[in-house]
Amino acid sequence: MIQKNNYKAYLYLLPAFLFLCVFMLYPLVDVFIYSFEENFLFVSQEYTGIGFYNYKYVLTDPYFLSAVKNTLLLVIITVPISTIIAILIAVGLNSIKPLKKLFETIFFLPYVTNTLAVGLVFMVIFDKTVYTNGIANIILGLFGVSPIDFIDGPYAAKLFVLSFYVIWNVMPFKIIVLVGALQSVKKEYYDAAKIDSASRFRMFRKITVPLISPMISYLVITGFIGAFKEYNNAVALFGTDLDSKGMNTIVGYVYNMLYSETGGSPSYASAAAIILFLIVLTITCINLLVSKKKVHY
């Protein structure tokens, strides 16, 4: 009977397994092969040799190194800040009763809003021209700060706008997940803590955070993966020529290499994609190892 049930289980898993093989495993293996084929062309399906030249070229390309720097800074800034803010907002939403559903809907709106439309709004907010200033510069002017060109100005200003936009864009999903996690925490724990005269901060640190730590770990891991794959948000703010703005990301570099005006360089794009895959895989494994010690299941 047990063996028969195992066959049924494998049969049920077969469609998902085939789907993963066709749409995930096969493309990954294909890209891995392309990354070693030097000067490969899609049209002729020919290449000049096999080796590590593509990786050497990519790892010494200034545009790729700039993209790696931008992506790493974006990850370091946006993942922890968005997660911490989402936790605080989720705790606040879980504590209120009146208009709770309304506030949840408002906080979830950025997640379902068109990225390019929101990017246009952010460009207007942080705009600086000869004739007019955006809302951000108007507010800065009230404190005696000179207008800052956030879109075409200093690197730090552009990184600030992009990080702000990414945080604003990813927080809704994190808030909804954490609100659901908080609702599963039993009230008996808080009642017992109140009897012991525990402060709100102590209850938050000793009860709330440990009990929702599996969801926090999940959001941190997916946050790292999502931040490393950032591209569309940068395009929404700075346009498609991200290299000229110095704000390209690794995914943007892969896209540029694959669809360049000279016909594309799939070999370089594949090498960059494999490097990105290895970076994300390493970070994910580290997070999983840390979560085994820090996460309370």
Image (cartoon, rainbow, N blue to C red):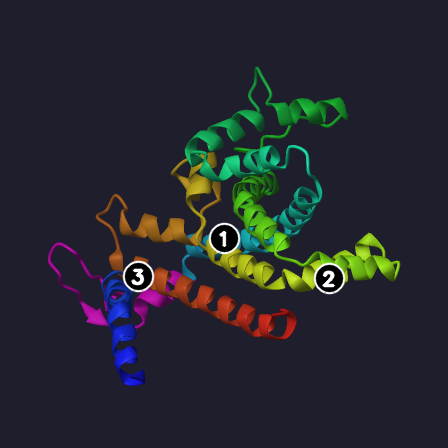
Question: Height in image: 124 above or below 297?
Answer: above
Tell which tag, 2 or 1, sits nearer the viewer. 2
Report which quarter residue 266 is drawn in.
Answer: bottom left
Residue lying at 26% horizontally and 74% vertically, measured from the top left: 8
Q: Are marks 3 and 2 in contact (CB under 8 Å)?
A: no
Q: Residues within 10 Å of mark 1 (few under 14, many from 20)?
A: many
In the rendered image, residue 36 lying in the magenta stretch gets the answer yes
Q: Which residue is mark 2?
A: 207
Task: Quadrant for the C terminus, please.
Answer: bottom right
Residue lying at 29% horizontally and 78% vertically, measured from the top left: 5
Q: Amino acid at mark 3?
A: Ser
Q: CA distance from mark 3 to mark 1?
A: 20 Å
Nearest to the observer: residue 5 or residue 112 = 5
Q: Which residue is mark 3?
A: 270
In the rendered image, residue 84 lying in the magenta stretch gets the answer no
Question: Height in image: 11 above or below 202?
Answer: below
Residue 29 lies, in percent from the top left, at: 26, 69
Report which quarter residue 145 is drawn in.
Answer: top right
Q: Amino acid at mark 2?
A: Ile
212 left or right, relative to 143: left
Say which element carries label 3.
Answer: helix
Question: Height in image: 166 above or below 99?
Answer: below
Q: Which residue is mark 1?
A: 227
Task: Name which of mark 3 and mark 1 comes first in the sequence.
Answer: 1
Which residue is the extreme one toward the front?
1
62 left or right, relative to 33: right
Task: Quadrant for the N terminus, please.
Answer: bottom left
Q: Amino acid at mark 1?
A: Ala
Q: What residue range appears in magenta? A: 33-59
Nearest to the observer: residue 47 or residue 217 = 217
Tell which tag, 3 or 2, sits nearer the viewer. 2
